[in-house]
Amino acid sequence: MSFWKKYHLAQTVDDALHTLVSAPGDALLIGGGTDLLLDLQQGRHPPVHTLVDVTEIPELTALEIRNGELFVGAGVPHRKIVDSALVHHHAQALTEACGLIGGPQVRNTATLGGNVAHALPAADGTIALMSLDAQAEIAGLSGHRRVPLSDIFVGPGKNFLEDELIVGFHLALKNADEASAFKRVMRPQGVAIAILNLGVWLKRTGDIIADVRIAVGPSGPTPRRMTQAETVLSRKHLTENHISQAFEDILEQAKFRTS
């Protein structure tokens, strides 16, 4: 059985977009393919006419400081993110998350953009990006635009992108007294989706938490921040009482799976 009829290796964003919209049948973008190819082979996604490979587009493979921000292209594989000194310094939560995705072979191939576009509520890279307040750069035939990461998701495994692609992600550079981290609870083999994961970004002013962002997955049908807990902790001393209240607020706001 053929899962696609045509495979197009795009060289530019416009090339990918024009191929996507002009295909005579259903067309899909493909990066590393570690999720999509399995979905096609195992019948979770119907066969398509055209696969548009975006892994050789220079804009999608950039990882650099750009206009005072850290830019991570959507086509950058997880291994490159883990190995990047820039990402480790400015976005440690993303380094830690990408280092836990799959095994070495998956991390060599799977891309950050694919992790986000797949729109799973507990996608490790996505949860880390949420805590880092990342903005996604989206390209369509009408041009480029930036949107908050949370705006991409419309349900489990569903995004709003139609005839568009994710070019990459813009993150603020790390300042003094700021840090981020990522942790997950996983099955013993360590290659399945997380049972529970957590990304946190925090800024201190002395002993005060000046600002904090907390993302938990899977805490509902889409990746999201725990805003109630953030409010409890912001502009407060880090005390056992505030931690307990934040914990209770996360349990109240999140809708965790029962199995």
Image (tube, helix red, strand yellow):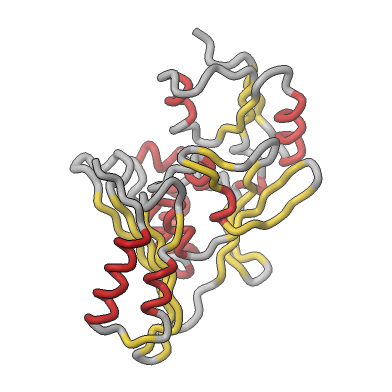
In front here: 109 or 142? 142
Determine the residue positioned at 26% across, 84% down: 239
- Which picture quadrant has residue 211? bottom left
Query: Residue reaching furthest bottom?
Result: 206
On the image, the x and y values in percent for residue 98 come to: 40, 51
Question: Can residue 103 be seen at all in this image of the molecule?
Answer: no
On the image, the x and y values in percent for residue 205 come to: 42, 89
- In the displayed structure image, the side of residue 238 where residue 162 appears, left or right: right
Determine the residue positioned at 28% across, 68% down: 247
Query: Residue reaching furthest front?
Result: 252
Question: Can residue 78 be seen at all in this image of the molecule?
Answer: yes
Q: Answer above or below: position of 51 versus 218.
A: above
Determine the residue positioned at 59% across, 53% down: 151
Determine the residue positioned at 40% across, 69% down: 228
On the image, the x and y values in percent for residue 4 come to: 58, 16
Query: Residue reaching furthest left?
Result: 188
On the image, the x and y values in percent for residue 26 come to: 65, 22
Q: Answer above or below: position of 184 versus 21.
A: below
Q: Answer above or below: position of 196 versus 92.
A: above
The mark total stands at: 0
Query: Residue reaching furthest right?
Result: 142
- Which picture quadrant has residue 188? top left
- Which picture quadrant has residue 96? bottom left
In front here: 200 or 91? 200
